[in-house]
Image (tube, helix red, strand yellow):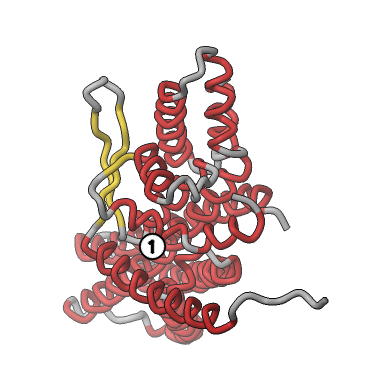
């Protein structure tokens, strides 16, 4: 995503990552795929930017992580939402819904703009 | 292609070796999975796409740099609080020992000891006050976002606290030397000496930690830009 949409996405990246992990423990690649799939391919962020967000959320105690070995034998770092992370997601989600409802109402009242003749 | 990319990313993160190792491992797993999932028959094309999708190493390293600085700031702030508290305990224990053993300062050294004690006391309480400020800063939520201003304040406070604490420890050393000077070596002088060793080791450790964090902060500044 570029420009304004990219900035909007970055601003909500923590909530997006927390939401992706609410489905269950996952490693970085799976989290990114989950975000891409669930957003209908709309959120196609530079994949490398998700890892700093994961580290930051872990540092804040909202996630925990551990190394596991996949059936393929490949070692992966799996992230899990902590109780604190669940609470933070619930709170951010509530704020987001209120905000989205308010903006939706505002835009609905505006209606389509007409071009001057 | 992937090893070169990973090497570059690890090199950019070399200010924090543990972080660099972990990020390299995670990025490697990610890129290999991305290549495996790519339907392209040409492996090098799949690798190129995986790397392009992952992003610029410098941009990723800059984001990790901020996280690393926040962690180091919290760690150094915690160390400052612990060392100040530890030195306070060592100082109190030494004074208690002098009281229990009824070991008083020789009268001919009383006047110089009073001056040293005055400086020592003010330096120590300054470090306690600054230590509390460091702790309060550490608890602020803004620190979690890596605001450069907050980090700058933490580092400066840690440097001044360490300086004040070093003056206090030097004062303690002088007072202990005045107290023990001329006394016959005996087992009663071991606890004051041990408490002084503890103080010196503590303040030296803190000084080295602060210097190390400042050096890392300077290294990461180039990644974060102006």
**Closest to the observer: A81 or B25?**
A81
Return the chain for callout 1: B
Residue A37 appears left or right of B156: left
Does residue B183 appear in the picture of this structure? no
Tag 1: Cα neighbours inside 10 Å, few (<14), some, or many (≥20)?
Answer: some
Residue A66 appears left or right of B26: left
- What is the quadrant of the N terminus of chain B in the image? top right
Does residue B168 appear in the picture of this structure? yes
Image height check: is B157 above or below B32?
below
Residue depicted at 63% across the width and 41% down the height: B58
Image height check: is A27 above or below A104?
above
Q: Residue furthest right?
A: A117
Q: Residue B201 sits in which quadrant? A: bottom left
**Closest to the observer: A42 or A34?**
A42
Residue depicted at 48% across the width and 60% down the height: B70
Q: Residue furthest front?
A: A117
Residue B93 image position (x, y, % from top left): 24, 73
**Closest to the observer: B17 or B29?**
B29
Residue depicted at 53% across the width and 47% down the height: A45
Residue B82 image position (x, y, % from top left): 33, 66
Residue A43 image position (x, y, % from top left): 49, 50
The tally of labels here is 1
Residue with the mark numbered 1: B79
Image height check: is B186 above or below B64?
below
- What is the quadrant of the C terminus of chain B in the image? bottom right
Q: Residue furthest left?
A: B100
Residue A59 appears left or right of A65: right
Residue A32 image position (x, y, % from top left): 41, 43
Q: Residue B22 sits in which quadrant? A: top left
Q: Residue B14 sits in which quadrant? A: top right
- Secondary structure of the residue carrying tag 1 is helix
């Amino acid at each position: 995503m570029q420009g304004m949409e990219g900035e909007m996405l970055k601003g909500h990246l923590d909530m997006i990552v927390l939401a992706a992990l609410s489905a269950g423990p996952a490693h970085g690649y799976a989290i990114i795929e989950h975000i891409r799939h669930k957003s209908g391919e709309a959120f196609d962020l530079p994949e490398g930017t998700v890892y700093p967000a994961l580290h930051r959320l872990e540092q804040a105690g909202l996630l925990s992580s551990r190394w596991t070995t996949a059936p393929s034998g490949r070692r992966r770092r799996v992230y899990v939402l902590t109780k604190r992370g669940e609470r933070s997601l619930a709170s951010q989600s509530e704020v987001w819904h209120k905000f989205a409802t308010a903006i939706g109402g505002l835009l609905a009242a505006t209606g389509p703009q007409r071009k001057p003749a | 292609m992937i090893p070169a990319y990973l090497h570059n990313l690890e090199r950019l993160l070399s200010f924090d070796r543990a972080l660099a190792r972990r990020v390299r491992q995670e990025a490697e797993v990610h890129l290999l999975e991305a290549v495996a999932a790519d339907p392209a028959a040409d492996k090098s094309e799949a690798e190129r796409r995986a790397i392009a999708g992952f992003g610029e190493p410098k941009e990723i390293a800059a984001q990790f740099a901020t996280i690393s600085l926040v962690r180091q700031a919290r760690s150094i702030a915690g160390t400052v609080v612990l060392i100040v508290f530890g030195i306070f305990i060592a100082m109190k224990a030494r004074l208690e020992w002098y009281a229990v053993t009824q070991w008083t300062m020789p009268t001919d050294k009383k006047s110089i000891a009073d001056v040293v004690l005055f400086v020592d006391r003010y330096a120590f309480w300054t470090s306690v006050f600054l230590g509390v400020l460091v702790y309060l800063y550490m608890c602020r939520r803004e620190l979690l976002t890596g605001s450069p201003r907050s980090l700058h304040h933490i580092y400066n406070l840690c440097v001044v606290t360490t300086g004040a604490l070093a003056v206090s420890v030097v004062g303690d050393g002088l007072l202990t030397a005045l107290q023990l000077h001329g006394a016959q070596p005996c087992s009663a002088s071991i606890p004051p000496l041990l408490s002084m060793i503890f103080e010196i080791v503590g303040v030296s450790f803190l000084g080295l930690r602060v210097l190390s964090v400042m050096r890392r902060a300077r290294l990461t500044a180039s990644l974060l830009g102006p």
